[in-house]
Image (cartoon, rainbow, N blue to C red):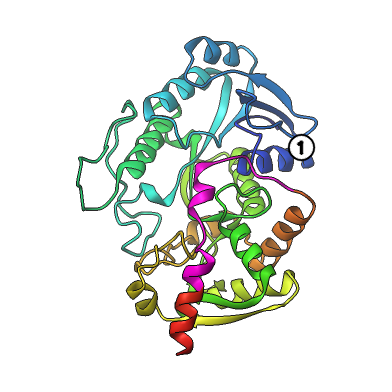
Amino acid sequence: MKILVLGGTWFLGRAVAQAALDRGWTVSAFNRGRSGEAPAGTRAIRGDRTSVKDLSNLAQQGPWDAVIDTSASELAPRDVLAGAQALEPVAGKYVYVSTVNAYRGWPNEPLTESSEVLDGPADADADYGRLPPNWDGPDWFYGRQKAGAERASLAAFGEKRVSILRPGVILGPGEYVGRLPWWLRRAAKGGEVLAPGEPSKTIQPVDVRDVAAFALDQAASAYGGRFNVTAPIGHETMNGFLTACLEVTGGLGHLVWAPDDVLIAHGVEQWTELPLWRTHAGVWSIDSAGAQAAGLRCRPLTETVSATWEWLQAGGVPVEHPRWSEHGISAQREAEILANLNA
């Protein structure tokens, strides 16, 4: 296989490029060169995805058996459309990495791969779906942008040549969002560790290496499709996840569980202050049976936790990203809630 990775220098894009090289594939990576380097052995092609000239130059470097788009998270649908149209004559397949945010029901309703997708035209600009001031309803802006980008890839390549991947939470070595790294560093400090919600609550994070492997399988597939890329429901629990964080960092901490209503009463910000904790009904109720049937294999979350800790201990540094600073509760806030629980 000869593939083009749009991105290729950090987290999922880098994992895709490395996994493809490990399979003996020929890999090109198109990016601006501002966020690190792709794995050794990758052919670097520099350029900006919003530049018509750069896209034209990129197309001249083909052909490829498949394009894997891992770097469109902040692109408007019309930019994804322009890139896909430029590459369509020189690529066989297009694998677009989207998100479960593209569903209208996320995160309030359980989801399947046939759930309703948000509106969002293929040629939408970066302002499409932006919310008015003082909006207090669902925040669909990002989801509408991603739904539009999905339609952009389909408009350029057609149903049979496009695989759309909709991951939920991706964890693993190289993570730039900061969810798992925060929990690992908190666990390493020891003492009483504020644990959110119900210990047996099912969670569905997926390892970045497993997403990469599935993306490559789809690149090699003769068929298109839409897939929720999450661990199976019931595969892991919050208790198993946090226990793994404690064990891999030395086992110095002790989990103290706080019910949802206690955390809500204390105004704890869901999803960020205690990463992965969220009370919405659909957040960890995503049916990924289609992806499992198509070959997605999810390793135990303990392996993801261990590999991420090894990466951090070896001096691993993620690409700088504003979302990193959003995650984690302050020591003072944690102590206050723990004191309330102990009382």
Is residue 194 covered in magenta? no
Q: Is residue 55 above or below residue 100?
A: above
How far from the left and from the top, in percent, is residue 31? 61, 25
Residue displayed at 47% across by 37% down: 73
Is residue 325 covered in magenta? yes
Q: Residue furthest bottom?
A: 343
Towards the viewer: 103 or 50:
50
How far from the left and from the top, in percent, is residue 260? 39, 77
Question: Residue 304: which quarter of the image?
Answer: bottom right
Q: Which residue is mark 1?
A: 21
How far from the left and from the top, in percent, is residue 288? 48, 60
Q: Is residue 147 above or below residue 37?
A: below
Towards the viewer: 116 or 10:
10
Q: Is residue 59 shown left or right of residue 259?
A: right
Q: Is residue 109 above or below residue 92?
A: below
Task: Kindly identify the amino acid type of the residue bearing the numbered disc 1.
Answer: Leu
Q: Is residue 109 above or below residue 223?
A: below
Q: Which residues are magenta?
A: 316-334
Q: Is residue 275 shown left or right of residue 183?
A: left
Residue displayed at 53% across by 15% down: 55
How far from the left and from the top, in percent, is residue 143? 35, 44
Question: Residue 271: which quarter of the image?
Answer: bottom left
User: Where, quadrant-wise, is the N terminus in this rendering?
Assistant: top right
Can the viewer see residue 181 in this picture? yes
Towards the viewer: 298 or 271:
271
Can the viewer see residue 233 in this picture? no
Q: Callout 1: few (<14), some (14-19), or many (20+) C-alpha neighbours within 10 Å? A: some
User: Where, quadrant-wise, is the C terminus in this rendering?
Assistant: bottom left
Say how many tags the image has.
1
